[in-house]
C-alpha cells in the first residue's frame, strides 16, 4: 500500500492541478482509514461537510488551503503531508517547479508549498506570486501559529486583523497567524514573496477546536 502510494506520488506530483487533487485525495483517504474513521467522523472532527470530504477523497475538486488545513489538522499529519508521501530521509530536495501549487489566483498568481516538516511542530515554506490586484485572504489558523515572510519583488500589503503593513523588496514581516489575515498586491507589477508558517502541536487534539470558523 505504501509503495503504491509513493509510486503514485512521483508519477503525479509534478503535473497538473487535477493530478495534485488526486494525490491529496488518496492521502486523505489513506490517513482516514488509518484512523478507522468513517467519512462522517472525519467531517465532524475537521468541521467540514461530508460532501466536502467525499469530493476531496475522489479528487473531484481543488480544495482551498483552509479546507486542507482543517483536514490535515483533524488527521494530525500537517499540511505538507497531504502532498507528500511518508518519509524519513535525512534531507529532501525539491527541485524548482516541483512544489505543490495549492492556491491559484484569477490573474495567474500562485501559492506554492515547496517544503515542510513533520508533526508535531510543522514548518511550511511557501513561494508566493501575486499578479497586480490579486489578493489572498486567509482564515485564522490554529492557536500559536506564526508566520514570517520576505518580499523579493514588487509591493505587498499584509493585513493582520485591523493592522495593514506595506512592504517593498527586501522588507520582512513576522506576525501571528491565528488571526484573520490577507496578502495583496497593490502595484502594477508582479509581487513575489517567501512565506514560512510555523504550526505547533499538530495532532495534539486541540488544533481543530481552536481554529476559527
Image (cartoon, helix red, strand yellow):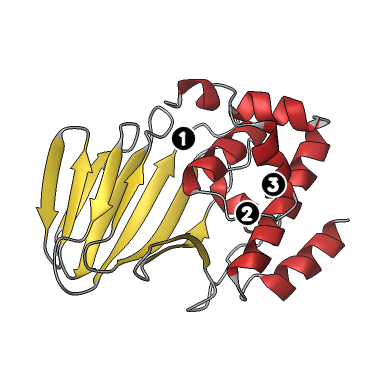
Residue 72: where, in percent of width, then height?
Answer: 60, 40
Measured from the top left, where is residue 117 in percent x and y? Answer: 54, 51
Relative to 67, residue 91 above or below: below
Alpha carbon separation for disc pair 3 and 2: 6 Å
Task: Quarter of the image for the C terminus: give it.
Answer: top left
Q: Residues within 10 Å of mark 2 (few under 14, many from 20)?
A: some
Residue 82, horizontal then vertical, whole percent: 63, 51
Q: Which residue position is annotated with label 2?
A: 61
Q: Secondary structure at mark 3?
A: helix
Dot 1: within a 10 Å radius of its alpha carbon, few (fewer than 14), some, or many (20 or more) residues? some
Q: Residue at x 65, y 40 (%)?
A: 52
| 16, 115: nearer the viewer | 16
Q: Secondary structure at mark 1?
A: loop
The disc at residue 55 is 3
Specify the quadrant of the image occupied by residue 54.
Answer: top right
Residue 88 in sight here: no
Q: Are marks 1 and 2 in contact (CB under 8 Å)?
A: no
Of badges 3 and 1, nearer the viewer stands 3
* Secondary structure state at the residue bearing disc 2: loop
The residue closer to the viewer here, 154 or 89, is 154
- Residue drawn where x is 23% and y is 73% of the image: 190
The reply, left or right, for residue 6 in relation to residue 208 is: right
- The answer to whether the residue labelled 3 contacts the one labelled 2, judged by CB atoms less than 8 Å apart, is yes
Horizontal side of 119 relative to 27 (left or right) equals left
The numbered dot on residue 69 is none
Q: Residue at x 77, y 33 (%)?
A: 39
> Residue 200, which numbered label?
1
What's the distance in space between the residues labelled 3 and 1, CA to CA?
A: 28 Å
Q: Residue furthest right?
A: 1
The reply to whether residue 140 is in sight is yes
The spot of residue 170 in percent (x, y) is 15, 66
Amino acid at each position: 500500500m505504501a509503495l503504491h502510494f509513493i509510486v503514485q506520488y512521483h508519477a503525479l506530483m509534478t503535473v497538473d492541478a487535477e493530478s495534485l487533487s488526486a494525490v491529496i485525495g488518496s492521502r486523505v483517504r489513506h490517513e482516514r482509514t488509518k484512523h478507522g474513521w468513517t467519512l462522517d467522523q472525519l467531517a465532524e472532527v475537521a468541521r467540514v461537510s461530508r460532501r466536502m470530504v467525499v469530493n476531496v477523497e475522489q479528487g473531484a475538486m481543488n480544495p482551498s488551503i483552509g479546507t486542507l488545513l482543517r483536514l490535515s489538522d483533524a488527521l494530525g499529519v500537517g499540511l505538507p503531508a497531504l502532498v507528500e508521501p511518508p518519509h524519513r530521509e535525512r534531507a529532501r530536495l525539491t527541485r524548482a517547479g516541483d512544489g505543490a501549487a495549492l492556491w491559484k489566483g484569477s490573474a495567474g498568481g500562485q501559492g506554492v508549498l515547496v517544503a515542510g516538516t513533520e508533526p508535531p511542530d510543522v514548518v511550511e515554506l511557501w513561494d508566493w506570486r501575486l499578479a497586480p490586484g490579486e489578493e489572498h485572504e486567509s482564515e485564522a489558523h490554529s492557536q500559536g501559529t506564526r508566520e514570517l515572510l520576505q518580499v523579493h519583488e514588487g509591493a505587498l500589503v499584509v493585513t493582520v486583523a485591523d493592522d495593514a503593513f506595506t512592504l517593498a523588496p527586501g522588507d520582512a514581516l513576522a506576525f501571528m497567524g491565528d488571526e484573520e489575515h490577507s496578502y495583496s498586491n497593490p502595484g502594477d507589477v508582479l509581487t513575489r514573496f517567501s512565506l514560512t508558517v510555523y504550526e505547533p502541536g499538530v495532532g495534539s487534539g486541540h488544533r481543530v477546536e481552536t481554529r476559527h470558523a
